[in-house]
Image: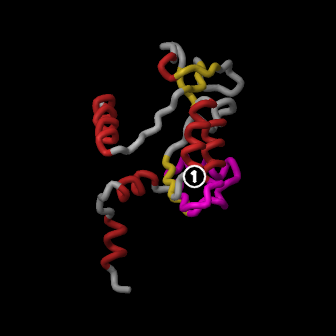
Amino acid sequence: EGIELARKILAKADETGCSILLPIDAVVASEIAPGVETHTVPVDKIADDMMGLDIGPRSRMMYITRLEDAHTIFWNGPMGVFEVEGFEQGTHAIAEAVAANPGMTVVGGGDSVAAVHKFGVADRISHISTGGGAAMALLEGAELPAVEAILASPQ
């Protein structure tokens, strides 16, 4: 079900000229633990007994390059298991790139908010919202009861 939805999204993006950047390499390990042995591999070469736990260095550079040219950034979701030593580099690099961008930057969702605080860049983000799911729904055009109530209330 999820794979088919992803294929539809990628096809729609291609039709409309929208680019979706997917990771090209990943930091993998057999378990989620600090100090565990890790390897960086292309995403299509992740072995069945391994887990992709962070984006790799080539993916980091690809995303950072794109973020440098952005005028508006909406970030929802970390790039890896940033809470665990050895898997934080991707999320840290993206947090720094978002914070360095002079445009409008919005970080949404509890994990991403925790990441920008952990890496000390929260004060350089334009807006931070712990309501990642609600923020995504609003961007999708959904009506949110609280927002509707505020808009309908007298000034």
**Residue type at the position of mark 1:** Val
In the rendered structure, which segment of residues is drawn in magenta? 99-126
Q: What residue do we see at 54% from left, 45% from top? A: 66
Q: Is residue 47 visible?
A: yes
Residue 17 as seen in the image, left or right of residue 48: left
Q: Is residue 54 above or below residue 105?
A: above
Residue 111 vs residue 126, the one in the foreground: 126
Please say which color scheme the image uses: secondary structure
As helix, strand or loop, the secondary structure at mark 1 comes to helix
Quadrant in the picture for residue 27: top right
Q: What residue do we see at 60% from left, 51% from top? A: 98
Q: Is residue 31 above or below residue 86?
A: above
Residue 51 vs residue 69, the one in the foreground: 69
Q: Is residue 150 above or below residue 96?
A: below
Q: What residue do we see at 63% from left, 48% from top? A: 97
Q: What residue do we see at 65% from left, 54% from top? A: 100
Residue 56, position in %: x, y? 60, 29
Placement of the N terminus among the 4 image quadrants: top left
Residue 118, position in %: x, y? 67, 48
Residue 45 vs residue 2, the one in the foreground: 45
Residue 49, position in %: x, y? 52, 13
Q: Is residue 119 above or below residue 149?
A: above
Residue beneath disc 1: 113
Placement of the C terminus among the 4 image quadrants: bottom left
Indicate yes or no whether the magenta region holds residue 143: no
Quadrant in the picture for residue 90: top right
Residue 120 as seen in the image, left or right of residue 51: right
Indicate yes or no whether the magenta region holds residue 100: yes
Specify few, some or many for label 1: CA neighbours under 10 Å numbering under 14, 14-19, or 20 or more: many
Residue 70, position in %: x, y? 53, 53
Q: Residue furthest front?
A: 17
